[in-house]
Image (tube, rainbow, N blue to C red):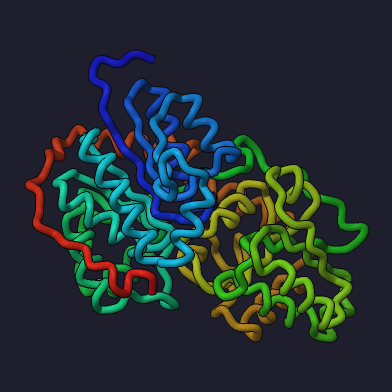
Amino acid sequence: MKIADPRHIAFISCNETHWGGSEELWGAAAAELARRGHRISVAKPNLPKGEPAIKRLNEAKCTLHDLAKFPLLPKAFYGIFSLISRAAGLSWQLARLDIALRFSRPDMVILSQGGNWDGFLYAGVLRRLGIPYALICQKATELYWPSDWMRERCKAMYADAQGAYFVSHHNHRLTEEQMGMAIPRGEVVRNPFLTAWDAPLPWPDTGDGLRLACVGRFFPMEKGQDMLLRVMALPKWRARDVSVSFFGAGDRAEGLKEMAAFLGLDNVAFPGFVRNVQGGIWAQHHALILPTRAEGLPLVVVETMLAGRVTITTDVAGSAEVCSDGETGFIAAAPTEAAIDEAMERAWAARATWPAIAAAAAASIRTQVPRDPASTFADIVLRLVDKGAVQAPARDYGEELVGAAE
């Protein structure tokens, strides 16, 4: 598509894993802006060539920079280099980013963070070069606080940002508390989802019992699958006609499977990662059970409600902002086994009303998220550029790397 005034917009992700839910918003918005005719650059450590979102960016003629790679050398060389020295690996990423930005000088940079402060080193490069930028913050949690050394740089990152886009009001408030400063340019945005907008799914048959799905990365420190396994090991849940399927991937998968075996659970299963969320999960399951300890706004909660299913989750981050306890789902008061068991018990007692609760959830969530979050965010980015965010004066900003790998 040809447009009269194409802009050069760069998207930077500081996520060093290959891909994750925190990448979906910037990835889809970048592809949308490229389709509209804008010049799009992307920089990220470990660009996964086989990931569908990266394929779409390639097809849209975006310029891609893998920051965790040595030019003309196999990818394994960087992996070995970074394994020997974490600080040296980060230094190389920052140097690669600095060179790319000096040559391209984008009109605006969108810096995507998996958390709410993990991009501070990348922001240091942007501040030093005087390039205007905005932040995406996908998660904030009481579990993780920046050290005092990092925190001063994080505060500068937020102070200079043209905008800060959080996925929940909780994350915005908590970030202000952790930084000890107001973030007046903070806004709440929504992530793209993988379930259909037009209508919820038909209610599944209950002849072989109630089927719950626990959907999320296999990382119990944050996602809390260990607590759910202990709850499912209680005698009352062993005796009831209810099961839990754990969907996801991660390097703690075998540990969770062995924990389930050790507890002697025959009411849980581990189907693994499923890309087709709608047909592969929600067509067969009645409810989501999410015992999470740390979140932004869980994408799976939005998808569950859109699909017309019941949500049972903890009162962590933004879940209770979109799901009302007893009306469109069930909220555990805290991420503890006792609170999760209590919420599940209330849900079990109300199981005859689940179809009605699910229908209310499907109607409610469609008033809280846009039909096309990526296109909505693309519009936000263009408005940010059009507001005249000019190149700021370059700063004398040195980035020490001692302690950066904490």
Quadrant, the C terminus: bottom left
User: In this rendering, is residue 6 above or below 376?
Assistant: above
Q: Nearer the viewer, residue 311 or 49?
A: 49
Q: Residue at x 82, y 69 (%)?
A: 268
User: In this rendering, is residue 53 above or below 172?
Assistant: above
Q: In this image, 237 relative to 398: left or right?
A: right
Q: Nearer the viewer, residue 372 or 252?
A: 252
Give the mark count. Answer: 0
User: In this rendering, is residue 72 above or below 335?
Assistant: above
Q: Residue at x 68, y 45 (%)?
A: 275
Q: Nearer the viewer, residue 41 or 78?
A: 78
x and y percent of residue 50 in the render?
Answer: 60, 38
User: In this rendering, is residue 340 above or below 118?
Assistant: below
Quadrant, the N terminus: top left
Q: Residue at x 53, y 59 (%)?
A: 298
> Is residue 330 visible in this depiction of the protein?
no
x and y percent of residue 234 in the render?
Answer: 80, 85
Q: In this image, 165 relative to 83: left or right?
A: left
Q: Nearer the viewer, residue 253 or 45?
A: 45
Q: Residue at x 58, y 47 (%)?
A: 363
x and y percent of residue 312 in the render?
Answer: 65, 67
> Is residue 16 visible in this depiction of the protein?
yes
x and y percent of residue 53 in the render?
Answer: 53, 37
Q: In this image, 184 relative to 214: left or right?
A: left
Dividing the picture into quadrants, the one containing residue 346 is bottom right
- Work out which residue is located at the far right of the displayed protein and give it: 207
